[in-house]
Amino acid sequence: MDTSTWSWEPGERLIVDLNACKDKYEWIEELHVSPDGEKLGAVVNVQGEFSACINGEAWDETFERVWNLKFGPKGQLTGCASDMGEWKFVVDGQPWDDTYGYVWNTMFSKDGSKICTAVQQDMKYGAAIDGVLWENLYENATGFVLSDCGNHAAAAVQVDQMGQAEIDKFAAGIYTVAVDGKAWNTKFTNVFGLVFNPDGSRIAAEVRLNLYDYTIAVDGKPWTQTYQGTWAPTFNPVSGAVIAPVRQGGKWTLAQDGLPIWDFFVNCWQPQFSQDGSTLAAIVATALGSWTVAVDGRPWNVTADAMVSDLVVSHNGGLIAALGKTGEQWTAFVNGKAWPNRYDMAWAPVLSPDGEHVAAKVEKNGKYTVVVDGKEYSRAGDNCFDPVFSPDSRFVLVKMVEGGKYYRRVVPIAEFK
Amino acid sequence: MSDTAEHTEAAEPVLTFLEKVHAKAEQDQVDGKYAAFEKIEDVGIDQGVARLTPEKIQKTINGVLKGECGTRMKTYVETCVHCGLCSDACHHYLSNDKNPKYSPVGKVKRTIWNMLDKDGKLTPEECREAVIVAQTECNLCRRCQQFCPFGIDIAYMISTVRRISFKLGITPQYIQDTANSHSVTMNQMWVKDDEWPDTLQWQEDEGRDEIPRLRIPVDKEGADFMYSVIAPEPKFRTHLINQAAVIFDQAGCDWTMPQLPGWDNSDMAMFTGDFETMGRVKKMHYEVAQKLRVKKIVMGECGHAFRSVYDVGNRWLGWRMPPIEMVHSIEFFAQLFREGRIKLKDKYPEQVTFHDPCNTVRGRGLHEDGRYVANLLTQGVVEMSPSKLYNYCCNAGGGVINCGPPWKTKRVLSNKIKAEQLARMKDRGINTIVSPCHNCHGGLEDIIHHYGLEMELKFLGDLIYELMEKPGAVE
């Protein structure tokens, strides 16, 4: 996401006063904010019909229903809309040319230039990128993914028909991976956890070879080793090696191209490389109810008894953060240390471009604010949205709703105390 | 003429419902329905058994017993003194003329002990018997554990037999198909990804006929709770989603349901012993809730799913407790009433009885909350005997009903004791059973029908929806 063109002038701007537009609509649904904080969007009920509004102004067209509203990285507001029994995908008020039996699960390329959705057409399933539907559609498709560049979409697809309770046929394998609508030649009992490599030229997935044996397949070719279980793999962005959590003897480790590379844990998932490929981190349980992050195989000392989630790794691996929940309270774990305060809820940590700072949206006592490096912003609102760092890492964009008014604030990091 | 006929014909004897149950059971014996238990065929079991080899049997059994079972199994096996006090706890035993082979200890003898005694060297026929015992003659209801002087969890031992059966490839066809559905769609009824939000939307439309401003908020990030259900709700019992939406809306709840898979909390993979699929399904359930940043998950009126999300599936993954607070509808409804968020415009005009789901009562002790809610809604709860922690299972739970049509008659006849219990209620003038569990409804419906009990079944949500004040409703 290119943030260099955004306004980073320090200070506050009132974007929209929702109190002033309430009377225009029967109701206003959940609020969404564009990444640059310039637009506030919501589904609105206009005299029994539905539309979406941006900064209080509704799209020209209304529909029988609008749902799944999302802002893309470039600030485009998208939604799924139904009319006369057909479904449309709408971008900034303009429907794509085709209509569908159903459309859902919006995905954006990393820079926001491509938009992908899952589509059902005449009870067959596939994906559409910028409104161009796969040529081949399938009996069923699950686990859709879009490559970072947005040029390729993939899903686990059912390639053979199956009658009711045909368990032998199921076990023999009727599922595979389809990339841009083209299915691999090999069929599997199940396919899960699809992931593209960074440039979208390769794809890996968990595959179940029968009811008992799991492994990883890369571009259609399964590893020779099999396991009791697997979780979603990842690519080393530099070497191209594929890493995946695998289960052997009831415990979990990471395997690279089939071979274990870490010690075993009670669980291990969501492996993530730094962009330079130098550092590998994953969420691990070192014992029942003891969760943390392991970096290059070594678990941090800080643990959470409930869960750890939302692992993020900086470009060079120098900054690693995740959320930790102990009891009913959340905090962030950063490079093995917990932030000092606890929150009723926390959102995914955001890293600064220079790899020095961590920010997160949090909730405490029904109010929402932003925390940077463990220090809270001076104000808390009725709602706020994920923070964004400026390109030079000196400022934080705080998007906050207070008293029905939505403010965009650019706040120097030094103001978080 | 008519006067004469009335005086000359003998009056039909009026049978009590209990007598009707006994008469029906006698007729079932005469018709050979009990004897037919031995001849039931199941493609999943029979074709699987035909593929077994001595090497595979021994390797698989010992692989599970020695590789996956630790101190817990050893302790149970060595502690049991074969006293048989568990026998009278089991509805299968009580419903089958106290045949010892149906007693809990008898079922362990026919499975785990046999495997241990023979070092895993069972014949294919013995494997067939083991899976039939584990999947169709035990509901994992844990009633026997209440009566065991040592508290041995026989359900755990029978679960292990299911795990072995799964690894042997001899799981009954229909429940295996359900587990297959979990592995593909992450729900138990092959509901496709689009069918789920589509169903929520048409239920929302239906609901707006009554409550014009009703919403089923999908993917509402930061809501207080995510509501999760089992797949039969979008598949067959869609009105339950509508009812829940109306209840939450009118009680002023801040709630959501997810767009993508993870919405189904049920788990037949747990009951086939396919723990890897169980773990995957539970992981997705909690991850989808975490992505929505909800503080808790409220789940619909289901028993077995509660066991999976609260006890078994979460722990298999390494979570000691549910990583996100998990609240059963029984507790949640009780909380809404206690907080005054549901007000009633009316009461159900009759007394009712309350059937406790094994997994919410013996799994978490929710019997008093259930009665608190049911008493508020009705003219009062009349207790069955036994009840609460000691209630008899419906014989549908534990995945038994999911073994499908081949096993239906055996399932119904093997719960004659429940039919007698219900008949005693019916003879006292109780016509309605409240039970907050889908499987219990399925099992009890079949029993009511087979024995002619003419009773009605209700979820708590059915009654709340029917009886609550709805300020947002159109006149």
Image (cartoon, helix red, strand yellow):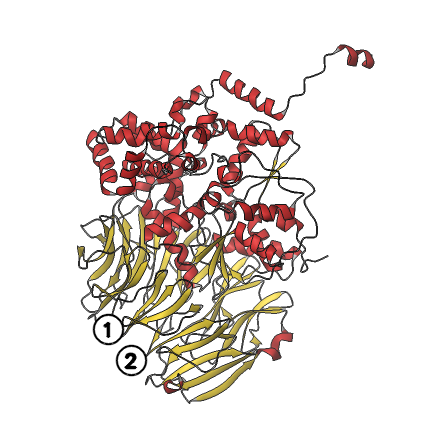
Q: Looking at the rendered structure, which numbered label has been put on residue A317?
A: 1
Vertical position of residue B247 compared to residue A17: above or below:
above
Where residue B269 appears, x then y in whole percent? 37, 44
Q: Residue at the location (32% across, 30% down)?
A: B81
Give the left or right position of residue B113, taking residue B310 as reference.
Answer: left
Q: Secondary structure at mark 1?
A: loop
Chain assignment, label 1: A
Residue in front for this viewpoint, A255 or B368: B368
Q: Secondary structure at mark 2?
A: loop
Res A289 quadrant in image: bottom left
Q: Amino acid at mark 2?
A: Glu
Q: Is residue A345 visible?
A: yes
Vertical position of residue B101 compared to residue B188: above or below:
above
Residue in front for this viewpoint, B296 or A65: B296
Q: Residue at the location (36% across, 33% down)?
A: B134
- Mark 1 or mark 2: name the one nearer the start of the chain: 1
Determine crowd level at label 2: few under 14, some 14-19, many 20+ residues with C-alpha closer than 10 A.
few
Where residue A155 appears, x then y in whole percent? 35, 56
Where residue B447 appears, x then y in whole percent? 54, 31
Q: Which quadrant of the figure contains the N terminus of chain A?
A: bottom left
Q: Amino acid at mark 1?
A: Gly
Cα distance, mark 1 to mark 2? 11 Å
Q: Residue at the location (53% across, 52% down)?
A: B331
Determine crowd level at label 1: few under 14, some 14-19, many 20+ residues with C-alpha closer than 10 A.
many
Vertical position of residue B335 compared to residue B158: above or below:
below
Same chain shared by disc 1 and disc 2 = yes
Q: Which residue is mark 2?
A: A356
Chain assignment, label 2: A
Res A24 quadrant in image: bottom right
